[in-house]
Amino acid sequence: MYDIIIIGAGPSGSNLARLLGDKYKILLVDKRALSNDNNSSIPSKSCGGLLAPDAQEMLAKLGLGIPKEILVSPQLFAVRTIDIQNKIERLYQRFYINIDREKFDRWLVSLIPCNVDKKFGCLFKGLEILENKVKVTLSHNGSNIVEESRLVVGADGANSFVGKQIHNVLNPPSKYISIQQQFHDNCHQPYFTAIFDDEITDFYSWIIPKDGKILVGSALKIDDNPKEKFELFKDKLEDMGFKFGNGSNTSGAFINRPRNISQINIGNNKVVLMGEASGAISPSSAEGISYALKSSYYLYESLCIEMDGFYDRYKSKMKSIEANIALKNMKIPAMYNSTLRNIIMKTGIKSITASRELYPISSRI
């Protein structure tokens, strides 16, 4: 029997397995084929692949430095903000590390101690909580496998099936779907572009350059015709002068947008949740990697001494993430209220001035 079964080998699951692998008998499960000999750079989920300053800080605290083969060009030092509704744009200095997200995940997996068992290309089917253990059913190549563990950790993202096994959410966070498509970069953009348009979404959309290509994406309400809204978004961009051509590698991912801390759920002392599975994600930017690394580190700290009493320790540590998400929610009116956003952007506060060559679209908004 395992001490811990971790469902999901994204940043939170891999980081926990890396930190605890020499102390506990661990099984790490993921539906992706994350074998080291598969170096495909095609992402399995819709992710912009940007490491924000909070994620950079957590990597530093974990003593991790990113190998150069994971980086993609260009490295980004500014956010170009376009408000279509108010017909205004600004450039703001920000610092992001631009990465290949799937290679980043594979790199984190490569750091896991060899004594950690891994089942990749394996689906989580369900669990049964018993008195002294949890039975986990997995599916591999059409056959069911049953494993047993003292503790199950759900690190399986916003649409966590592990989370659905253990609780009915009475006050669920707002649900969005991120749709993203890849195109050739005809403009050689040196910045991350954030786009606001209430007709498309009450969240935001983006354009991110990646090694001669661009990722065009939007966080869309799941019950508001997201496919049609995404096509309308691309049409609007083309009317503004962006030229995309034929797209490829369309991907999608669920996003939970917590608007209060009651929507953060870390499970119980038999089945615990972390990262996006717990609802830990920025409600203002949808940034999740920093929360994945932070929550997995908190769970590591709670388990590294002994398993008894870990849940109360983890619950206490997660309060700092809850406080951070509460602060992020305080930023939302300034970012997502059209009138306030217009006032702030018109002042030019904290914006930087760039040559007009960087703004070929301004006159067409």
Image (cartoon, grey):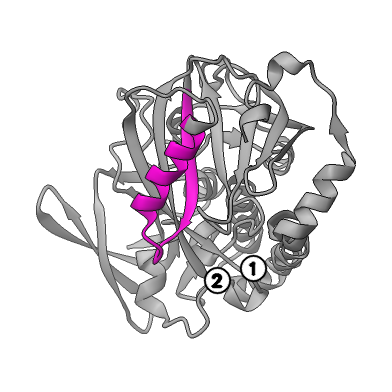
What SS does tag 2 mark?
Answer: loop
Query: Residue at position x 38%, y 55% from top?
Result: 226
Q: Is residue 231 magenta?
A: yes
Give the amino acid type for the residue marked by disc 2 in the picture. Ile
- Please, which residue is most extreme toward the front here? 363
| Relative image position of residue 252 (x, y in whole percent) | 37, 47
Tell me the quadrant of the picture where the N terminus can be found: bottom left
Q: Is residue 343 magenta?
A: no
Callout 2: 10 Å neighbours few (<14), some, many (20+)? many
Query: Residue at position x 68%, y 42% from top?
Result: 87
Number of the label disc, if any, that sits on residue 314: 1
Query: Residue at position x 14%, y 59% from top?
Result: 144
| Relative image position of residue 220 (x, y in whole percent) | 47, 55
Give the amino acid type for the residue marked by disc 1 in the picture. Tyr
| Relative image position of residue 6 (x, y in whole percent) | 41, 56
Q: Tell me if label 1 and label 2 are in contact, CB under 8 Å.
A: yes
Tell me the quadrant of the picture where the C terminus can be found: top right
Q: Earlier in the sequence, mark 1 or mark 2?
A: 2
Report the front residue among 88 and 301: 88
Specify the segment rendered in magenta.
214-238
